[in-house]
Image: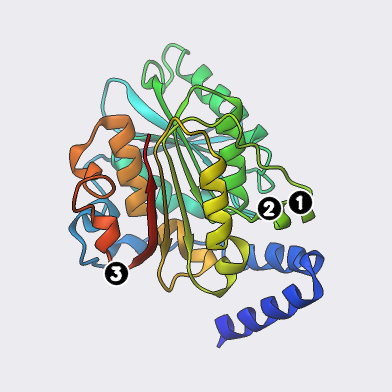
Amino acid sequence: MLNTLICFMTSVMIRFGESLLRWGTLAYCSMFPAVRQSYNHKFYPSPVEQKYHANSYCAVRYIKENGVHVFLPEGTGKMPMIVMVNGTGLKALHYRPVFEHLASWGFIVVGNDDSNAWSGDSALLSLEVALAMGQTPCHDLYKRIDTGRLGVAGHSQGSLGAINAASRDCRFKVLYAASVPKQSLVQNLQWKCEFENINIPTLLVAGAKCIDRQISPLASMHSLRDKIGTNSPIVVSRLTGVEHRFVLHEGDAYMTAWLRYWLYGDQYAHTAFFSPKAELFHNPRWQDVSVKLL
C-alpha cells in the first residue's frame, strides 16, 4: 500500500514538473535509512550471487577517527580500500551491515557522515584521511592500505559523489554506481555529474520498480554508459522488482563480486559478468543487462 501511494505521488509530481520531483525524491530517500543486520541471510538461487551476498571469513573491526568511519578486516598485510559515498540524508552507519559485509570479503571500507555528498568532495577528503592513517606508525591502518587497489562506490546521490570522485582522482581503479539520478533531476537539484575523465571499470545498477524508474531510468543509464570513457568495460543492469531504497543492499552481491574481480583478480567473480555463460544475464532477479567491453 505504501509503495503504491508513493508511486502515485511520484507520477503526479512528474506531471507537474521536475521541481516537485526534487523535493519528493529528497523526502523519499530519507524515509527508510536503515539496512537490517540480517539482510544478507536470505537465499538466492544463482550461485555467484549467493556466494558474494553472504559474509565471508574475515572478522571486521570498526574504527572512527577524524570524522571517518573505517571497517577493517582482521589480519595483516595490505588490502584494497573502498570509499563509500552516502545517499541523500544518510550517514555511514546507516549502511553499517553493508559495509561490514564488504569488509568481510577483504576490503578496508571507508565512509563519512556527509549526507549531501553529490560533489565527491567528502569522499576525496575521507580518502586522504584514511591514507594518512595508513602512514601513521602504530595506527591500526599503518601499512594496511594497498594504494594501488582503491575503489569508490555509492548509491543515489552517493552514486554522483562516487562518479565525481572517480573523475577527479585517478588513483581509483574501479567504480560502482547504483541508482544514478538522471540528468534532468541532477540539473534541477543543482548538482553535477563529472563523468568525462572516467576510464576505469564501471558497474551501473538500478531498481526496476516505480521510484527508481523515475530517478534512474534505463535510457539515462544507457546514456551515461555511452558517455563514460571508451577505454574501460562497463556493465549495466537493473534489479527486477526492487525499489530505490533497497538497491544498495539487494545488489551488494554483484557489487562485491565486481570489486573482488577488479581488485583481487577473483576469477569466480569474473563468471558473473564476462564468461560465455555470465550469470548476470541469466539471473531472474536481474534484467536489462548489457556489457560494453574495451
- In what quadrant of the picture does the C terminus appear? top left
Label annotation for residue 187: 1
Position of residue 142 relative to residue 235, above or below, is above
**Local crowd at mark 2 within 10 Å, few (<14), some, or many (≥20)?**
some
Whether label 2 touches label 1, CB < 8 Å: yes
Residue 233 position within the rendered picture, expressed as x and y whole percent measured from the top left: 39, 38
Which residue lies at the image location 61% right of the left edge and 27% below the top edge? 168
The answer to which of 203 and 289 lies nearer the viewer is 289
Q: Residue under circle 2?
A: 183
- Residue occupying the point 44% across, 30% down: 231
Kind of residue at disc 2: Gln
| Callout 1 touching callout 3 (CB < 8 Å) | no
Query: How far across and down, in percent of the image, does residue 61 sit?
Result: 37, 37
Report, in whole angstroms, how far the alpha carbon at label 3 lies from the one at label 2. Answer: 29 Å
Q: Residue at x 36, y 44 (%)?
A: 102
Provide the residue designation for mark 3. Answer: 284
Mark pair 2, 1: CA separation? 6 Å
Residue 44 seen in render: yes
* Mark found first going from the N terminus, 3 or 2: 2
- Mark 1: few, some, or many residues within 10 Å (few <14, many ≥20)? few
Q: Residues within 10 Å of mark 3 (few under 14, many from 20)?
A: few
For badge 3, the amino acid type reads: Pro
Spatial CA span between label 1 and label 3 = 34 Å
Looking at marks 1 and 3 on the same chain, the residue that comes earlier in the sequence is marked by 1
Q: SS of the residue at dot 1?
A: helix
Q: Amino acid at mark 1?
A: Gln
Is 138 positioned to the left or the right of 166 in the image?
left
Which residue is the extreme one toward the bottom?
Answer: 1
